[in-house]
Image (cartoon, rainbow, N blue to C red):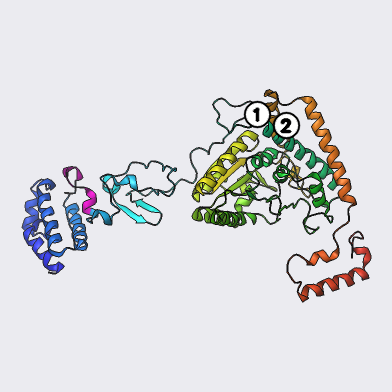
Amino acid sequence: MSISLFMSISLATYPSIGHQTKANKERQSEKPPLDLSSFLPHLLDLFSLLHSTMGLWFVRSRLAHHLGQKMASLGALQRRSWPSVSFLQLWNPLPSELVGGFSSNPINRWSDQRFASVKAESAAPVDDRCRYQVMDFPGGKVMFIPEMRFLAESPGERISCYRVLDDDGQTISGSSFQEVSKEIALKMYGDMVTLQVMDTIFYEAQRQGRISFYVTSIGEEAINVASAAALTIDDIVFPQYREPGVLLWRGFTLQEFANQCFGNKSDYGKGRQMPIHYGSNRLNYFTVSSPIATQIPHAVGAAYSLKMDKKHACAVTYFGDGGTSEGDFHAALNFAAVMEVPVIFFCRNNGWAISTPTTEQFRSDGAVIRGQAYGLRSIRVDGNDALAVYSAVHEAREMAIRESRPILVEALTYRVGHHSTSDDSTKYRPVDEIEHWRTARDPVSRYRKWIERNGWWCDDAESELRSNVRKELLHAIQAAEKMDKPPLAELFTDVYDQVPSNLHEQERLLRETIKQHPGDYPPEVPV
């Protein structure tokens, strides 16, 4: 039996839903609107007839849609008069297994259940007629609404920032944080002070012309050391260039720092890199790379490897707010979210990408909101609060490994020093602003007040620590400065297993040029 024949039967049996004659229209205009409750049994009979005769839900769907349109045009589409029929059954007249097995309240099943611990926000009230119209789309079911709504360009309030210590170094009442033992607390403080002293002396060495370049971490000591303390040596670090404190925590010595900055034969990079481009295979710390954000997708790939090998470890990558403006950042976050890999994205939002303020970089609420946009669990933390950073990274690591998921941590801080020794930040930042962050919001002073209140530190210990670090570093610099440079041949090794002919030719030409112009090349490099 054809669809057209069924339509003929239905229109003959129920003329009120077919084309009306002029007389019918005039009679209807004198009557009150049609009561659907009296019409509904006939409609259900029609559905039953269609189903039992053809056995095709496709016909039921098409006819139900047609009847729905007709009833709507008669002003009879009033759901409150249908006490025993689900609206879903009219607009989706399919077996329950074909519509996802909806219960009487299908909304509870719309949210994506990939991560059971994530709760979706409650939806705003919508028209009941649209509440049960959904589309099963990749990623989850999507509800249709009749109103045209654009998402706001920004939330009404900025995302809050997690903090444990106030500016005076006292724990905030009601704050929750990871407990730190006395041993760990004192090592954290000792490394933060060491990093301060190291920055001061290496910066002066560059100004004296003894090294060619340097980058300080002044104002970001808590980010460096506290985040490193929350990790383990098995976690793989992909740094930017302002995280020497992570290496310091893991056991990189002051002599190793000096060897790299002076590029001598004991430098693991064999003098090929600029100063502060540290790296250590032993400490799972990938070598710093100058191009911004290139390390971020590398970290995701490493995390994917850790996941496949079922290692109890994660990858961690550091970058500044300027790095979030690079395409590598966005590709990496999407890759990590889709592949569900154990990686921590640590953004040091210090307000400035060299001379570009964050207000001229993006209109979003920092970096933390971008993590949410890509499906990452994210947190904003006070980057000048060592306890807050330690607690956030400690928990982030546990979640990343336990649930095999990426985490984004945005630490709000301030770059007190110049971007590098090639920069003068007073040309684009007020000096008063810099001094305020150097004094009132110094992370090292704040943390010191906390360990002093615990009875773990005093002025004598402070003086002894700073004096010892200074002596050790000055000795390391003197030793590194006197050490021989790597030989010229090292420029062409460690890339190919067998050096190709074109590199042999380049080496020959270089040696000939040095012989012709010896005064233009450093004499301390062995030829």
The tag earlier along the polypeptide, 2 or 1, is 1
Gap between marks 2 and 1, in whole Å?
A: 11 Å
Q: Which residue is nearer to you in this view: 303 or 20?
A: 303
**Residue tagged by mark 2?**
439
Residue extent of the magenta highlight? 78-90
- Which percent across, then down, holds residue 56? 19, 63
- Which percent across, then down, holds residue 495? 73, 66
Q: Quadrant of the C terminus?
A: bottom right
From the viewer's perspective, is residue 383 above or below residue 330? above
Q: Which mark is residue 38?
A: none
Judge whether residue 504 can be spotted in this image.
Answer: yes
Q: Name which residue type carries label 2.
A: Thr
Residue 108 in magenta stretch: no
- Which percent across, then down, holds residue 515? 92, 70
Contact between labelled residues 1 and 2, with CB atoms less than 8 Å apart: no
Q: Quadrant of residue 522?
A: bottom right
Q: Which residue is nearer to you in this view: 169 or 474?
A: 474
Other-residue count near label 2 (Cα within 10 Å), few / some / many at <14 / 14–19 / ≥20 = few
Label 2 secondary element: helix
Residue 87 in magenta stretch: yes
Q: Name which residue type carries label 1.
A: Asp
- Which percent across, then down, holds residue 199? 78, 42
Q: Which residue is nearer to you in this view: 93 or 363?
A: 93
Could you tell whether 105 is left or right of 292 in the image? left
Could you tell whether 490 is left or right of 391 in the image? right
Judge whether residue 369 can be spotted in this image.
Answer: no
**Residue tagged by mark 1?**
167
Could you tell whether 423 is left or right of 62 in the image? right
Q: Which residue is nearer to you in this view: 389 or 188?
A: 188
Q: Quadrant of the N terminus?
A: bottom left
Label 1 secondary element: loop
Q: Residue at x 74, y 51 (%)?
A: 278
